[in-house]
Image (cartoon, coloured by chain):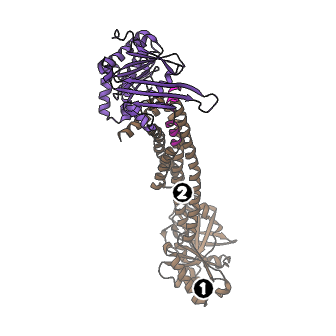
Amino acid sequence: MERLLEYLKVAHANLKSNKKRTFLTMLGIIIGISSVIMILAAGGGAKNMINQELNDVYSGMIYFYIQDPDKANMKNFTEDDIRFICDNAGDHLYGATQDSSTLAAKANTIRGTYDIYVGSGTPVKEYQSTDKIIKGRYFNFSEYNAASSVGIITEALAKKLFGTTDVIGKSFEVNVNNQSNEITIIGIRETKKSSGIGDALTGKQNEVIEIPYSCLERKFGYDEYKSYDILLIADNEYSMECSKRVQKLFESKYGVREEGAFGIESWTDASSQFDSILNIITLFIAVVASIALLVGGIGVMNIMLVSVTERTREIGIRKSLGAKTKAIKRQFMAEAGMITLIGGLIGIVTGLILGTIICMAIGAKPAFSILSILLASLFSCGIGLFFGIYPAKKAAMLNPIEALRHE
Amino acid sequence: MEGESRKPIIRLTDIRKNFFIGTPNELKVLKGIDLTVYEGEFLAVVGASGSGKSTLMNIIGALDRPTSGGYILDDVDVISAKDSELSGIRNRKIGFVFQTYNLIAKTNALRNVEMPMLYAGVSRKERTKRAEELMELVGMGDRMKHLPEELSGGQKQRVAIARAMANDPAIILADEPTGALDSETGRMVMDIFHKLHKEQGKTIVLITHSPELADETERLITLKDGEIVGEREGRRYDDAV
């Protein structure tokens, strides 16, 4: 123990006596370690953030479609099918809505004409987004059945059209599919702050009015909905259970006997796929960053070899004073170890700081994992020892007579 | 002198050392050296450069192995010792004093003196205490914390002698210890050797090419072309110190 302390002291003195060189050698390790930690933290943070934003849009959504019309005994879902699910939803399932696209539209108010988007569906659509209704209410089934001209607009749209969110009961003209109708606002949906990355991925718009699909169909003469898909809205963690239940409902309704009639695609599946893609990207970048670490390690080896050459005479003296091969080896290992250890520590701190800065810049919460920090530290110590071994051995094996003669 | 009752501390028998063995350039540097050095003896080995002095010193100092021959140092068979055991022999049985001092730079005088004790596993406290005593002994008590570069040649050599004494070795092996010093400081260094020899009964082997210095020792042997060609008592041994 005492001798270890001595090795460390000698190592420290040697490193200190050549500060610039020591720092430059450490720099390789610092860059390597900090970039690994930074990338893992920023990657993790970005992943969490994108996941959260995607979750806001897609959580609890299940695409339910006819995979094989022959087995399913029908060609496409109808309005009746959607109502059938809404009426028989059961626990954790809000019901079904049309998988309808969000349409580009114009809004005419006294202030002027604006570009907006129109979303449509059944009253179940209220639960499709995690953005809450903060004022008023969503349209209900009696309004849906009546194809009422009512709508829920987003906070962002309210501010754009009226400059305020105090707009319940106000109406404005919506033009879509070349037809215009007055829509009365009955509710406001919040507009969450987002990084835009999630929105870009999902195509989510912030300036949207949601109206009953029946209204879109009957009052605007829109009949795009001829797809084979319906959208189920469920509590996310019960997606699988709910979709199975819906499948059974349809199977008994249409007398389906074979498997493979219906297809199910839930967000849970998609998000885990998405997760693994992001994980692979993060891992790939981390591997690239580890190359920096490797280069840093080679730098340590290089400088240790130089140090052995420079201190050949000192090694000879130490040997003549009775230093065993092992002692010389340990001394050089201590030096390599110290460079990588200190470099590693600085690298970890730098990585944490840079990771936080990057995450703050993209608006994500940094995701530092103890595991990644631990791995990076172990890796850096390993590199120090691994790349220290060769020069240390070289030093220890020096012939004392030749070493003493060395100038 | 009680010569017969003295204990042999170095016993070299038929030591040979060849270099470039098996090549056409094979070089026979030592050609069968028989030498016994007794405990407490002050011996000089003289010879011109190329006579094999340095090779002999390396072998006595356990830095090198002879090609053949026997070597017993303080009852230990050096020939059959493993490399790690040779380190131990150098550490505890031999104190080197080199012409070029060979102090470790960037390490202060006291730490230099402590170093052999460090490798011997002596505790820090004890190391420091003994090193301080030795520094006093060589008259360097007031310069313990100086770095080698801050010391004069004579001072460096005195630190080196203190270091050689650190583990109380069986012999002190001095290779041209005054070779790099002017005559005045050289004199001072020689006086320290005499002091160690007389007061502490140290066995000292002095390797030198200077006949004057060699004459100050009890016995001097002359090396020529790898063989001992002469042996006599020092003429001025009794005058010294």
Secondary structure of the residue carrying numbered label 1: helix
> What's the CA distance linking mark 2 and mark 1?
42 Å
The mark found on residue B135 in the picture is none
Q: In the figure, A351 relative to B97: above or below?
A: below
The chain drawn in purple is B
Question: Which of these two is toward me, B111 or A382?
Answer: B111
Report the label total. Answer: 2
In the rendered image, what is the letter of the chain coloured brown?
A
Would you name the residue on which mark 2 appears?
A46
Badge 2 crowding class, 10 Å Cα cut-off, few under 14, some 14 to 19, many 20 or more, is many
- Quarter holding the N terminus of chain A is top left
Where residue A371 appears, as percent x and y from the top left, is 46, 55
Give the mark nearest the N terminus, 2 or 1.
2
Please identify the quarter of the rendering in which residue A161 is found.
bottom right
Magenta residues, dominant SS class: helix
* Quarter residue B21 falls in: top right
Judging depth in this view, the residue of A345 and B63 nearest the camera is B63
Residue A75 seen by the camera:
no
Residue at x 43%, y 33% (from the top left corner): B78
The residue singled out by tag 1 in the image is A80
Looking at the image, residue A89 lies above or below residue B193: below
Q: Amino acid at mark 1?
A: Asp
Q: Amino acid at mark 2?
A: Ala
State the residue at coordinates (48%, 28%): B15
Label 2 residue SS:
helix
A279 left or right of B203 in image: right
Q: Is residue A199 above or below residue B197?
A: below
User: Label 1: how many residues lie within 10 Å, few (<14), some (14-19) or many (20+)?
Assistant: few
Which residue range is magenta in the image? A388-407
Residue A314 image point, x, y percent: 47, 29
Residue A305, x across and y down, in percent: 54, 36
